[in-house]
Image: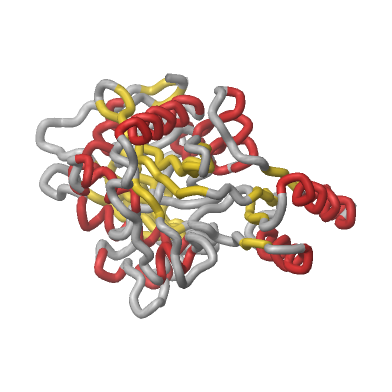
Amino acid sequence: MSSETSPQSPERKPRVAVVFGGRSSEHAISVVTAGAVLRAIDRAKYDVLPIGITTDGRWALTADDPERMTIADRSLPSVEQLTDAADGGVLLPVTPASREVLYTEPGAVPKALGEVDVVFPVLHGPYGEDGTLQGMLELAGIPYVGAGVLASAVGQDKEYMKRVFTSFGLPVGPYVVIRPREWENDQAGARKKIVDFAGEHGWPLFVKPARAGSSMGITKVDDLSGLDEAIAEARRHDPKILVESLLRGREIECGVLEFEDGPRASVPAEIPPVSAHDFYDFEAKYIDSASGIVPAPLSEEETRRVQELAVQAFDAASCEGLVRADFFLTEDGEFVINEINTMPGFTPISMYPRMWQETGVEYPELVDRLVQAALRRSTGLR
């Protein structure tokens, strides 16, 4: 299936629906990201329609009010705080024949909100960043910012992400996966699998949800006594868990952005050790505003190498639009890729926009390039 981007009448600006929130544990960070995008997008160039997805999955019209979409006094925002109607819902088109968005309320005639030309999905985690929303938009024939169905799914599932990277010759660290059925049918056997992994690679281990982000649900486990609690915390976010060995070295990140002539890498950044936290966890990232070093203090050769690997990871997973690639620079001088994020955080303190700002692409231009890249693409096979 393929549908071309609908032509714009000369008097109408392209309409961008910014979709955010969602059902995942990263709901609040998605709201913060959306606030930053809404603040930066060029209103002289685009019409903007903010659409929030509540924690129970309802699509809602929300206030276009970025100032309310921030973390204030350690309090996290939500879509529910931005919408007045408890029962109203937004309906996107379901066929390529129309891009008309409707608003419905019980007992009322649906109200047309106009056509949408491109969707900017700033959803993080399952039910948005994982290919589910992307599939719906493909069926509707609506262009959208960022990775397609396959790349989104690969980027969300850390096991298959690592399998793809390995198949393309990219270096990954040791890991083991515990699938839902393994834990539910034989906890002792699953636990032994992890202990055997620790026997081979050593403690500490990192136990994490296989399909979550923003460092949600990750626990550093120093010995066997903390293993069950770490498994329970990871499974609170995802029944499938990933266990990784500790890689000793420096944490390096690099952004990739789609330009007219293909993907390019930003200057890299370094995430230094955070004294108040065991590792770069959710609170360090978003609550305590731990800051990275941009650009990373690397040699020219190290910078060139990590940029090269970041673009290779982008291509290996068939990504589009943008990616943040996270690496470890080990003590023996080798880069090991940890993961990619196909919709990295866009909060004011997020590393992705900071890296591109240092590279020469300011935040408003970054948002504009992503929208323009989406408008250049057709939906369907490409």
Q: Residue at x 34, y 35 (%)?
A: 303
Count of numbered badges drawn on the protein:
0
Q: Residue at x 46, y 72 (%)?
A: 276
As drawn, is 195 to the left or to the right of 144?
right
Q: Is residue 97 visible?
A: no
**In the rendering, at what x and y percent does residue 137 appear?**
44, 37
Vertical placement of 364 versus 151: above or below?
Answer: below
As drawn, is 87 to the left or to the right of 269?
right
Question: Front-most of 111 and 41?
Answer: 41
Scheme by which the image is coloured? secondary structure
Residue 191 lies in what quarter of the image?
bottom right
**In the rendering, at what x and y percent does residue 37 appear?**
27, 53
As drawn, is 42 to the left or to the right of 310?
left
Question: Front-most of 12 and 127?
Answer: 127
Q: Is residue 149 visible?
A: yes
In the rendered image, the quadrant that contains the C terminus is: top left
Q: Residue at x 29, y 65 (%)?
A: 63
